[in-house]
Amino acid sequence: MEQSCHSGTDVHEDHASARKSSHSQETKNNLISRLNRIEGQIRGIKGLIDKDTYCDDVLNQIAAAQSALNSVGKLLLEHHMNSCVIDRIREGDHEVVKELMVTMNKLIK
């Protein structure tokens, strides 16, 4: 599970857009597969609404999609912490801790 993060040095890009992650193909495939399933769930929810499905049934499907998306977020966060965050701390960039806290607060809302 080789992963790393890279910071670009192009002066025409802002800091956030210049950063890149490098995930293994296995990790990318896993994340994309999960997101494809979630995309299908969302299409299904739209169909339920279009068919006037009972609200509680639609809400249960929304909860399932939210849970699946949260799982993708947790997986990506785990990989981020084990690669990008560790790499940046080793490089002496401790600002990454503040960045991580902001991101985690967004994920756990």
Image (cartoon, rainbow, N blue to C red):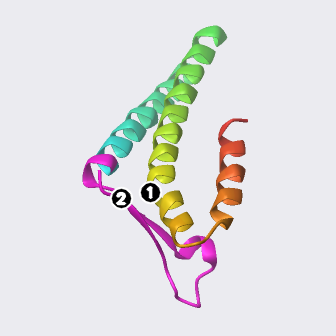
Residue at 58%, 91% in the rendered image:
11
Q: Give the range drawn in magenta.
A: 1-27
Foreground of the two, 2 or 49: 2
Foreground of the two, 84 or 65: 84
Residue 87 lies in the magenta stretch: no
Residue at 66%, 45% in the rendered image:
104
Please give left or right for residue 108 compared with residue 64 in the image: right
Residues at discs 2 and 1 in contact (Cβ within 8 Å): yes
Percent position (x, y) of residue 94?
A: 65, 66
Kind of residue sitting beneath label 1:
Ser
**Mark 1, secondary structure of its residue:** helix
Foreground of the two, 39 or 49: 39
Quadrant in the picture for residue 50? top right
Percent position (x, y) of residue 98?
A: 71, 58
- The residue carrying mark 1 is 83
Kind of residue sitting beneath label 2:
Gln
